[in-house]
Amino acid sequence: MQDKENSSEVNVVVYCASSAHIEDVYFDAAKQLGKILAKNNITCVTGAGSQGLMGAVNDSVLENGGKVKGIIPQFMIDSGWCHSQLTELVVTESMHERKSLMAKQSDAAIALPGGFGTLEELAEILTWKQLGLYKNPIIILNINGYYDPLLEMFNKMIEEKFLHHNYSKMWQVVDSPDEVIDCLQNFEAWQPSFNKYDKKEL
């Protein structure tokens, strides 16, 4: 994992669902992931929510002695969406600023199952990696085969030549949280050939 400037801390951003109306298998995975991050002294960066898988990850990290940095726009705080016991809270003016900070302050990204918001975050961080704006590990936690259709779509993109086959190296897929640490410690360095844009800022 890349070290951020002036910091030796390891921060991992977790993208996941805010819905509470989902199967227990997903909550179990979120709780296990939170425990693993805490036990490995990895700061968890999330969207600061208190519900769904995001709330479960946040609670698990904190319950196991870890740290959570939440990044959230003010309108979500005003709507009562924010977790009240996070280690650190960063308030932004917009969703765009929120997502940029979450990525910029992370050494890796993990996607648990989720809806439109999670899908958008995953697609954006993959796009940034494709462009060389983000070179850190991106891990798709394919709990209960949730991401199988999306991974098939990725393969279709490559087969139809909308993506170069080398781009399949941008992400890693695991089936359980227990595999995450190994992925973080053993990932293939990303060396994009695409260099049209300035890569200093996200």
Image (tube, rainbow, N blue to C red):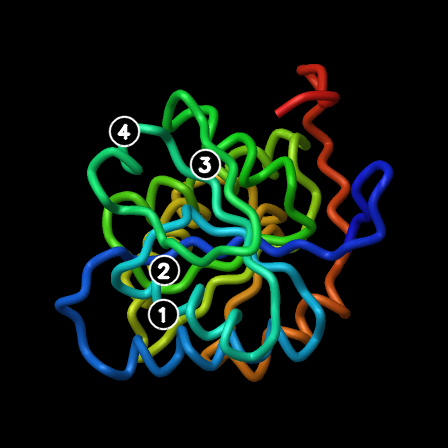
- The residue to which callout 3 is attached is 124
- The residue to which callout 2 is attached is 54
Badge 2 marks a residue whose secondary structure is: helix
User: Which is closer to the viewer, label 4 or label 2?
Assistant: 4
Badge 4 marks a residue whose secondary structure is: helix
Rendered location of residue 188, percent (x, y) = 75, 59
- Tell me which label, 4 or 3, sits earlier in the chain: 4
Q: How much space separates mark 4 and mark 2, taking CA atoms?
A: 18 Å
Rendered location of residue 17, percent (x, y) = 29, 57
The label number, if any, that marks residue 56 in the structure image: 1
| 84 shown above or below 140 | above
Tell me the amino acid under the disc marked 1: Ala
User: Which is closer to the viewer, label 4 or label 1?
Assistant: 4
Q: Residue at x 47, y 40 (%)?
A: 71
Tell me the amino acid under the disc marked 3: Glu
- Tell me which label, 4 or 1, sits earlier in the chain: 1
The label number, if any, that marks residue 125 in the structure image: none
Tell me the amino acid under the disc marked 4: Phe
Q: How much space separates mark 1 and mark 3, taking CA atoms?
A: 24 Å
Tell me the amino acid under the disc marked 2: Met
Q: How much space separates mark 4 and mark 3, taking CA atoms?
A: 22 Å
Q: Residue at x 63, y 48 (%)?
A: 166
- The residue to which callout 4 is attached is 75
Label 2 neighbourhood size at 10 Å, few (<14), some (14-19), many (20+)?
many
| 186 shown above or below 91 | below
Q: Residue at x 71, y 22 (%)?
A: 199
Badge 1 marks a residue whose secondary structure is: helix
Q: How much space separates mark 1 and mark 2, taking CA atoms?
A: 5 Å
Badge 3 marks a residue whose secondary structure is: helix
